[in-house]
Amino acid sequence: FINVLLIKFVLNDLFVTEVEKNLESLISTLSFAFITSYIFYLIVIKRKEVIRNRETYAVICGLTDSLIENGEHILKLIAKSANREQEVKKLKKIDLDTIERLCELADVSKIEAGNRLDTGQFIIVYGRKKVNFYIEKIYVFMPFLEGEYIKRLSKIQNSSFYHHKIQP
């Protein structure tokens, strides 16, 4: 853009002969072509990338929310099985020790009224299968990413709980 301004207004008197005028015209045309192609790039290509990134971000947020809700459901299920629902509801933050203590107290063979599965089977369904489903979907949308989020998802998938084989 500056190139065009310099040629047209500041350096206009330098181009006197026919060859120099043709050179001025060529430089101006190339400058305009560059500006036009850059605007095209911004409007067509970059805008599509921004829209695609927003859509991906929305899907990832939804899948992450589903993972969190799934974890909360599992925690409620374990607390109910351990008869500690009220205690868990009062806690503002739950640490790993609290979860381990609840798991020790939980009766995984307990079947709630109206359910066909016992607590242990529910944990398998919601703790392994659903988590794997959500994580795999996230990997589909974010296969190229590295960072803390992907490391945490990998840690979940590679945990001993996740790979523990449950005997029927």
Image (spheres, rainbow, N blue to C red):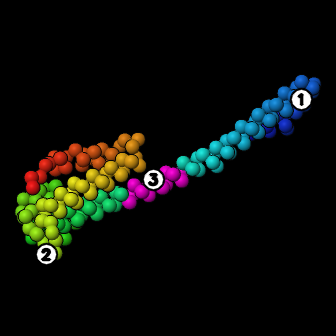
At label 2, the amino acid type is Ala
Left/right placement of residue 6 relative to residue 47 reads right
Depth check, mark 2 against mark 3: the one in front is 2
Q: Which mark is residue 56?
A: 3
Q: Position of residue 116 (x, y in %)?
A: 15, 69
Q: Position of residue 131 (x, y in %)?
A: 26, 55
Q: Position of residue 139 (x, y in %)?
A: 36, 47
Count all numbered tags in the image, as a single digit.
3
Along the line of sight, the residue nearer the viewer: 129 or 48: 129
Depth check, mark 1 against mark 2: the one in front is 2
Residue designated by label 2: 113
Q: Judge whether 135 appears above or below 30 on screen.
A: below
Disc 2 + disc 3, Cβ < 8 Å: no
At label 3, the amino acid type is Thr
Secondary element at tag 1: helix
Along the line of sight, the residue nearer the viewer: 2 or 134: 134
Q: Does the image show residue 3?
A: no
> What segment carries the magenta color?
50-62
Q: Residue at x 39, y 43 (%)?
A: 143
Q: Position of residue 42 (x, y in %)?
A: 63, 46
Q: Residue at x 16, y 75 (%)?
A: 114
Q: Does the image show residue 100?
A: yes
Disc 1 + disc 2, Cβ < 8 Å: no
The CA span between labels 1 and 3 is: 51 Å
Residue designated by label 1: 21
